[in-house]
Image (cartoon, grey):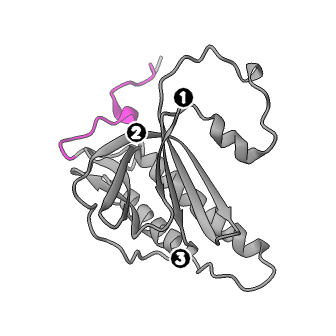
Amino acid sequence: MAILVHRYDAPDRFVAGTVGQPGERAFFLQAREGNRITSVACEKQQVSVLAEHLDRVLDEVVRRSPGPTDVPPATRKASDTDPLDAPITEEFRVGTMTIAWDPTIDKIVIELFSNVDGDEDETDESRPAPAVEAEAATEVNADEVFVVKITAGYARDFVARAQALVSAGRPPCPFCLQPLDPDGHVCPRANGYRRPLF
């Protein structure tokens, strides 16, 4: 089965963004190159994990580099704070994500695979084991993939924006740490249940 590939080797913009109010936000990852725009839906947790792992990969590149690198230090302030580009048309919902550093082009390669509900009857033992880890990505059960290649500096900016986006949501309840809704919060730690005294 052929996989539809949305490829951005040198995007003008790659950002995480939201649509809606806190508590009802829809999260998107979006790339733009010229007039071409691709937007994929994802979960808040996926944005957070992607940002965290991008930081780890970049820190590891700096650690393993024998000399000076073009990887800037982590920053807390994003330079791109503009809203998502319109129109926001969801191509697919993200399932599996992979991140890799390509030393031949000195860029981060991000692959976002569509979330496909398929038959889970086929086991991994029925397939031949891939020879190298890079081939494992081709075994992902997906109809579409979104491939973005960005520089280390752009990746650091993406991380700063993504972290600000995730933290800009609803404040946590001080007791249960679940998000507080604007119209009220039923806290599971104060739901009226008490152990009998006798």
Q: Residue at x 74, y 24 (%)?
A: 127
Q: Which element carries disc 3, helix, strand or loop?
A: helix
Report, in whole angstroms, how far the alpha carbon at label 1 lies from the one at label 2.
19 Å
| Coordinates of residue 141 in the picture (x, y in percent) | 57, 31
Residue behind mark 1: 1
Q: Which mark is residue 93?
A: 2
- Residue 3 x/y as whole percent: 51, 37
C-alpha gap between disc 1 and disc 3: 36 Å
Query: Residue 36 is drawn in which quadrant?
Result: bottom left
Residue occupying image coordinates x 53% and y 76%? 153
What amino acid is at disc 1? Met
Give the overall secondary structure of the magenta segment: loop
The image shows residue 147, relative to residue 72, as above or below, that is above
Q: Does the magenta segment cover residue 79?
A: no
Which residue is farthest top?
Answer: 121
Looking at the image, the residue that sits furthest to the bottom is 68
- What is the crowding at mark 2: few (fewer than 14 residues within 10 Å), some, or many (at least 20)? some
Task: Please say if 94 is above or below 57.
Answer: above
* Residue occupying the point 60% across, 68% down: 107
Q: Is 6 on the left or on the right of 168, as rendered?
A: right
41 over 149 or under it: above or below: above
Residue that label 3 marks: 153
Q: Secondary structure at mark 1?
A: loop
Question: Is 83 in front, or is 148?
Answer: 148
- The image position of residue 117, as x and y in percent, is 47, 24
Residue at left offset 33%, top offset 67% = 34
The magenta region covers 182-196
